[in-house]
Every structure is written in structure tokens, then in C-alpha cells.
Image (cartoon, helix red, strand yellow):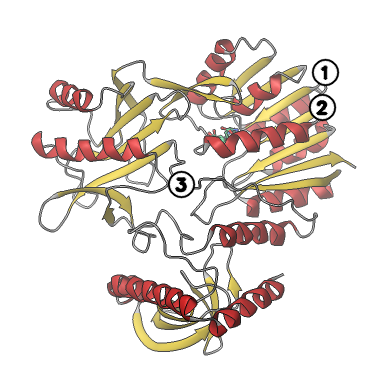
Amino acid sequence: MNNQKNKGYKNSVNKHNRSGKQNKKQHNKRGNQADAKHNRKHKKVNAPQRGQKIATAKVTCSGLTSEGKGIAQWDGKRLEVADLLPGETAEIIVSKKGQYVNGDLKKVITPSKDRVTPPCPYYYECGGCQIQHMSDQAQARFKEETVASLMKPFGKPEPIFTMDHPYDYRNKNNLTYGMNKDRQIIGGLYAQNSHEIIPIDKCLIHDPKADEIAKTIQGLMKSFKMQPYNEDTGRGFLRHVLIKVGKFSGEIMVVLVAASSVFKGKNNFVKALRKAHPEISTLLHNVNTRSDSMVLGNEEKVLFGKGTITDTLCGMEFEISAKSFYQINPVQTEKLYSKAIEMADLTGEETVIDAYCGTGTIGLVASQKAGKVIGVELNNDAVKDAIRNSKRNGVKNARFYQGDAGEFMVQMAGRGEKADVVILDPPRSGSDEAFLSSVAKLKPKRVVYVSCNPETQARDLKYLDKNGYKVEEIQPVDMFPQTNHVESVVKLVRK
Ligand SMILES: C[S@@+](CC[C@H](N)C(=O)[O-])C[C@H]1O[C@@H](n2cnc3c(N)ncnc32)[C@H](O)[C@@H]1O
């Protein structure tokens, strides 16, 4: 697959090299862009985590990793170079730390026709997006090829569902606050693989309203002398702000994630924020004293509003709380869910299991075409949302249970219960043997596997393939444009 791809890229580069002034101009612009990127990243190349610079080398990129990095050979070693595209020749800086050799792009010598100037000015520093240097078509091709390569043992995927406007799509936006070296409060996103905050005004994949509110909060912190939390010293108050937006309803939830439950000046702060943004529907104070990278802690206080927001998806209304999972790209979610339900092939009679059901969204949409839906989910808040959502939409044929999906299925199989269709949508780590072996025992006619990580999905498909199921259809969906992530939904039928 890679060879084929490279041929295509090589041809296009040659075409470019032969091209006239206009294209030369384009090339220079692309080359300069990569230079500029290097200048900004230079300090990172020499930063301790990259190790000691050992060489500058000229390389040719032979393909992409599943993370969207360019593959290049240097001194008999395979290097993965961020922002390098197949077919491109480039100058890279090689550094070494312990046994690890890293390559960082210095300058693109012959740019690929797939290279574009990233529209975001923070792209090269920020860790949020990884493939903004690829054109929309190249992003789609990269994701299709990633899924195709992982799914090779099971069949050929359909063309990816892309997004017409692949920006402004996130309904869940998380920004972090800190202090710069001049003791000024900054707010933004983390740099790649680090907790260094890159100050930003606007993120192109965020909901624009969310960034406006985050900026206002940054200004209010100064006036209210509210200190950002410092991970190293453990001092300070505000860690993050989490902003969820109902893209259809327009409702907005703001969660102030703080290191302490004592919120000095709370009433005046809330008043000032609401005055600046009367469109905020609900405001919460979440207390996070954890030292890991989880955004939210367990303790939560509603400062005003009902503590949840509602949104519409596939014609149904859903109530969403701060901690429960809700798909982050509603435009693409409607395409994903429609495909999943089409794959479930429901006639109105079936018992459907919606495993890892979150707030019950897939199961509730499926309930309109099923006999009965049984949802299971680990997160108690999400289960409460699912039950509320069921009532809100007048659904009478769905039940939701809190628990581990694997254990739940083992118990179902043990009781000899029946299921016609199993829809599963596990987290990135995928499902587990308890769950998959119970599927094999329950023997549903169809299994629809939704996944945000095709790598673990392929692993689980291998198990199902060995235990009585055959893959019939594979559909990649671009739920996360500009990033290297891809969603995939697979239909399996009993052999
Ligand atoms: C990718 S989300 C899917 C949610 C839902 N299907 C949707 O489309 O919004 C995965 C969900 O699995 C839940 N989860 C994680 N581990 C679980 C487990 N062992 N058993 C049941 N649910 C689990 C998470 O809390 C999360 O809500």
C-alpha cells in the first residue's frame, strides 16, 4: 500500500518541479513555511527531551506512520519526522537521547503537492492538531490508508466520510491557564507531548464562542487576582476551563476546574462572567486535586443554571453533564450514527445491546427501529443522563445499566439471555476478552463495532473473526479533522 502511495506522491513532486512560475512561488511559500516552523521549533530540537544534536541530514520521505509523521531513513535507521510528507526531500536535524534517535524537520527542499500552509498560526507549537500541513484531500487519503492498512485481514474500507467545513467543530473545548516568565496570566493549549502552555487566542477546531469565553475568564482572573494553578509548586487555584456547547441548541456549559473547593470571591466572579457572557446557560465549579492528566475531579458544584446542557442529535434531544462522554463533532456524529444503525439492519423486533453507551445516544436513536434496547456504561453520571434522555424523548423500550460492559455481558451470557444485535463503542483502549467472549456466547446475528482507535478495533476484530464472526463492511469517518485521529465503524455478521 505504501509503495503505491509513494509512487503517486513522487510523480506529483516531479510534476511540480517541472512546473512554471506560479508553482515555483507556491513551492517557495511551502518551503519557507517549513523553515519558519524549524526556526520556531529550534529550541525544542535542542531541548533535553530531544537529546544531543548529532547531524544535519538530507532525507527523502518514503511514507507516513499511523500518527501522520513522515518516514525517513538515516544512517540505516528509520526516523519518524513530524510534518514531513511522502515524496518530499528535506533537511532534518538528527538528535540522540540514550538509544533514541530523533529527526526534526529543518527545511523542505522539494515540497509535495499535498503540502499546504497550515491555517492556524499556532500549529507548529501546539499539540492539538498534527496534520494541518496536509491538504483536505491528503488528510482524507492518509486516514483511509491508515484504516485500510489495519483492516487488511478483514476487507477493504469504504471511502471515508469527510466534513465539508473541517473547522469550528468541537463542542467540547478545554483550555489551560498558567503564568509566563513575566508573571502574566496566559491561557491556551498544551504543546505536543508536554505540559508547556502555548498561549492562544483562537483555536480553529474549537467552537469560536468557547475561545471567547475562555479569553474573558483569563481577563477576569487578573482583575479578581485569581492565580492559575502551578503543577510544579501545587499552588494557585484555576487549572482549566472546560466549555461544552450544544451546537444545535446553542446552550453553553462552563466548568471552572480548580485545585481547591474554596472559591474566594465566587459570587462577584460569577456575576462578572455572566454579565460578559449572558449566553452561558450553566456554570460549574469542579474540584480537581489529582496529579495525573485527567481534566475533571470528582467534586462538582453548580454555580448557576441546571448543571447540564441539552443538544439535538439525529432528531433526538440529549442532556449532557460535565463528566459524561458526548461525541465531540456533532456534524460527523450524525453520519456515524446513521451508518451504525444502518449496519444494525433493524426491523423493529430486535433486542439491541448498546455497550459503552455513554449518555445513551446510539441506543436511543436505534430504539426507534428496535424491539428493545439495553444500554450499559461504566460512568454513573452518563447512565443518569441516559435514563433522563430516554424519558425526555419518550422512549419506552430502552433500559440503561451502570457497570463494566464486560462483566455485564458475562452475566447476560451466564443467564442465557438473548441479543440479536450488539453495538459497541468502547474507549480508545478497545474492548476486552470478557466482553468479546460473551458476545461469542450470546451469538447475536450482527455486531456493529464503533471505534475511535482502529488499532485496538483491528485487534478485537481478530478475536471476533476467530470466534464466529465475519466482517462485512468497514466505514471510516473523519470525526477529528486536522488531527491524526480517525473513527471507524465495522459491521460483523455471524458466520
Ligand atoms: C467512546 S465513548 C462512547 C459513548 C457513546 N457510545 C457515544 O457515542 O456517545 C466510550 C464510553 O465507554 C465508557 N466506558 C469505558 N470503560 C467502560 C467499561 N469497562 N464498561 C462500560 N463502559 C465503559 C466511557 O465512560 C464512555 O462513555
Q: Residues within 10 Å of mark 1 (few under 14, many from 20)?
A: few
**Closer to the eye: label 2 or 1:** 1
**Residue 377 at what x, y percent from top left?**
58, 28
Is 438 above or below relative to 197?
above
Please say if the residues under marks 3 and 1 sit with CB atoms less than 8 Å apart.
no
Please name the residue shown 68% across and 33% down the image: 338
Instruction: State the residue position of label 3.
Output: 167
In the rendered structure, which amino acid carries the disc numbered 2?
Answer: Asp
Residue 349 numbered tag: 1
Q: Is residue 189 visible?
A: yes
Quarter of the N terminus within the rendering: bottom right
Spot occupied by residue 259 in the image (x, y as percentages of width and height): 24, 37
Q: Can you tell me whether the CB of the residue at mark 3 lies under 8 Å from the nearest atom of ligand 1?
A: no
Instruction: Give the percent coordinates (x, y) of residue 182.
Output: 10, 57
| Front-lying residue, 178 or 30 | 30
Residue 420, label in figure: 2
Badge 3 or badge 1: first in the primary sequence: 3
